[in-house]
Amino acid sequence: MASYGQFCPVAKAMELLDQRWTMLVVRELGAGSTQFNDLRRGVPRMSPTLLSKRLRTLVRAGVVDRTETDGDVRYRLTAAGEELRPVVEALGVWGSRWIPELGEEDLDPHLLMWDVRRNVVRERVPDGRTVVTFRFPDRPVGVRDWWLVIDDEVDVCDFDPGYEVQVRAEIDLGLLVEVWRGDLDWPDVLRDGTLRLDGPEPLRRAFPSWFARSPFAAVPRVEQPVPR
Amino acid sequence: MASYGQFCPVAKAMELLDQRWTMLVVRELGAGSTQFNDLRRGVPRMSPTLLSKRLRTLVRAGVVDRTETDGDVRYRLTAAGEELRPVVEALGVWGSRWIPELGEEDLDPHLLMWDVRRNVVRERVPDGRTVVTFRFPDRPVGVRDWWLVIDDEVDVCDFDPGYEVQVRAEIDLGLLVEVWRGDLDWPDVLRDGTLRLDGPEPLRRAFPSWFARSPFAAVPRVEQPVPR
DNA sequence: CGGTATCCCCGTCGATACTG
DNA sequence: CAGTATCGACGGGGATACCG
């Protein structure tokens, strides 16, 4: 953590926060993940070594609290960490507005399914077990098919868990990402057949209401795209 | 600018903004500097090569606009850059509250005098030329004595420009930094003789009103310092 | 004033494998 | 589940000098 040699509070904050991955770990903690392997799912491209290191740095900085009881390790934001919410929020709003274009490398199906999983609105899904599959026809086998098992808990699998499936959804990954981000709406992709749903009509109709979108989906976008 | 491989807007924002020095350059631009060498004074420990590189990156990202007219080069925040103000603001507030301790290496007299210079409240200083000196008795010769020439413009010198001096101020650097940051108030350092002023009584009395403090000076501090 | 040119080092990070 | 261990490459960035 190299010093900027400045007394400015922005500089002091960035000495900690400009370290690669750090804000994303804070974001994950803010989103509610507390266990090491859950955090990993939120930053799938980060090596466990580095995650471990960043967590230690954040603990030292007083931003994260690590507790271990009976071998159960938990990471939580401290008061200082909670107060980083406005920073994450401001960054997310800015990113939504001014970096609308995604690269192919940004389309990580693991991360998307992890986000979708975390944002299932349980009350809107029928009681009992509901199984939804997502197929990304533009992806290679292995990351093409996903199962979402919505029960008391919500689980994601990249293999067939063997349950009966109620709704099958098929859409290119990039387009579902755009829906998640709020660049597109469910009606947009349903209307033109970009999203194909298979299953009983009442379930197909209810389907979009089951999934909350990104916290930044509602951020007003820039009307005129930036001229480059 | 390594990608995080994430479609999350926070990640996309940080791909640009987590690069070392970047937020400080944005802060400087937001504070009103437009010329290359003025920007340098706001980030004195940054090499010109790197500043140049960062500016180019920011221009490419649509955050900064570079204009050149008759050899006069100016850098200004674009609309996208202006919208980074909430980010800088949130970072500064957080840094003020949660990183109160400064290291010796953070006490850069050049930066402090640059900040002081920029925040002279011209209307409160007597008309005509007023020259103020700052002496940091705890600093070595060369960065110990500073002249502030307040006229139509405000200039800082680290050498005697030869004018008659109206007020001489003497205080340890760290303490003036704390006043600037809002950790201390003028009355605090005046009362106990930490700050010694020399000059006509009316000017000595008015002196503190001549200098606005950091934009983050008024941020409410954390009552209980973080236990470490 | 507004930058380039060079050079080199060191630390960060990524990749991969493995463990209690 | 919660991390460590190891290793190598690469490139960011600091230092310094210089130029139009």
Image (tube, coloured by chain):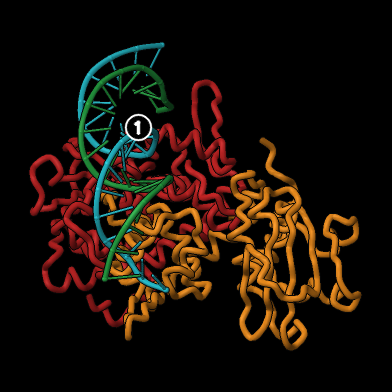
Chain colours: A orange, B red, C green, D cyan
**Residue B65 in sight:** yes
Residue A86 percent coordinates (x, y): 50, 68
Image coordinates for residue B6, horizontal then vertical, percent: 57, 53
Circle 1 — which element?
Answer: helix
Above or below D19: residue B22: below
How packed mark 1 is, by other alpha carbons closer than 10 Å (few <14, some 14-19, many 20 or more), is: some
From this view, report whether residue A127 is shown above or below residue B97: below
The residue sitting at 48% across, 70% down in the picture is A38
Instruction: Determine the residue positioned at 33% across, 76% down.
Output: A66
Q: Is residue A83 left or right of residue B129?
A: right
Query: Looking at the picture, does residue B150 appear above or below residue A129?
Result: above
Instruction: Let me know if residue B112 appears in the view.
Output: no
- On the image, the x and y values in percent for residue B34 come to 47, 39
Q: Position of residue A143 (x, y in %)?
A: 64, 55
Residue at image coords 22%, 49%: B108
Task: State the residue position of label 1.
Answer: B48
Taking the view exactly as shown, the residue that stands out farthest to the front is A162
Determine whether, in the image, residue B81 is placed left or right of residue D8. Answer: right
Image quarter hosting the C terminus of chain B: bottom left
Q: Chain of mark 1?
A: B
